[in-house]
Amino acid sequence: AQSVTQLDSQVPVFEEAPVELRCNYSSSVSVYLFWYVQYPNQGLQLLLKYLSGSTLVKGINGFEAEFNKSQTSFHLRKPSVHISDTAEYFCAVTRFSGGYNKLIFGAGTRLAVHP
Amino acid sequence: EAGVTQFPSHSVIEKGQTVTLRCDPISGHDNLYWYRRVMGKEIKFLLHFVKESKQDESGMPNNRFLAERTGGTYSTLKVQPAELEDSGVYFCASSLSAGLRSDEQFFGPGTRLTVL
């Protein structure tokens, strides 16, 4: 079975500062990894995903994440955040297999960007 | 192109009542998923449809929950009778096909259910 741990439930940061949101996963099989963002009163939006290939994945809105297999981590980073990045961020995994792809989510990290 | 829509956006009901949530996936998407997030916890998988067939309903909490997808288009999730612990946000997602590579799931805005 897979599981996802997001180590920080809340991350406060000042505007233009860098940020890292941490995600660790456990799985006995290969997985695909995702970061989703939920802005207030909206649905979840895919930020980026790792399927294979380069371990550094670039997503929308200047976010990137690095897949580290040995540490079973997939931390999300942005070098300079904006007020508009205030949202809740979810890390998720799914099994690397044919067939359907149910997502296993972490508990979420609330990013609060302050002026 | 319209995204995934869910109705209602909010529902407040009393314990013992029945509630039906609706999800309209993106047109042409065969796969439809239901997820639920209970207050402050992780988003959990409930079930998955491929067209009108239930592919996996391993996440359904109990037999008070009934999901249908008539004609392989929209889906409904009925809770009858509702209990306090059913409160949470119910998300629907759809994807085009579930092949060998993970197919992006597009999420709706969710329905916030409050059971009093």
Image: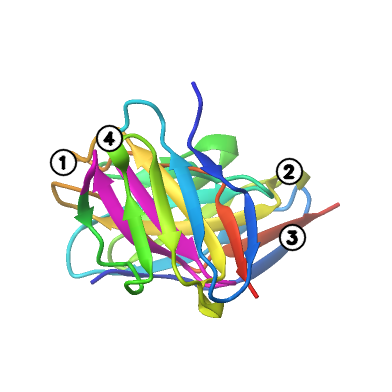
Q: Amino acid at mark 4?
A: Gly
| In contact (CB < 8 Å): disc 1 and disc 4 | no
Whole-percent x, y for residue A106 in the image: 45, 66
Q: Which residue is tagged 3?
A: A13
Q: CA distance from mark 2 to mark 3?
A: 12 Å
Image mark for residue B11: none
Residue at position x 41%, y 36% in the image: B25
| In contact (CB < 8 Å): disc 4 and disc 3 | no
Q: Which residue is tagged 4?
A: B71
Q: Amino acid at mark 2?
A: Ser
Q: Disc 4: which chain?
A: B
Within 10 Å of disc 1 (Cα), the crowding (few <14, some 14-19, many 20+) is few
Disc 1, SS = loop
Residue at position x 56%, y 66% in the image: B88
Q: Disc 3: which chain?
A: A
Q: Is residue A91 left or right of residue A30?
A: right
Same chain, labels 1 and 4:
yes
Q: Amino acid at mark 1?
A: Leu
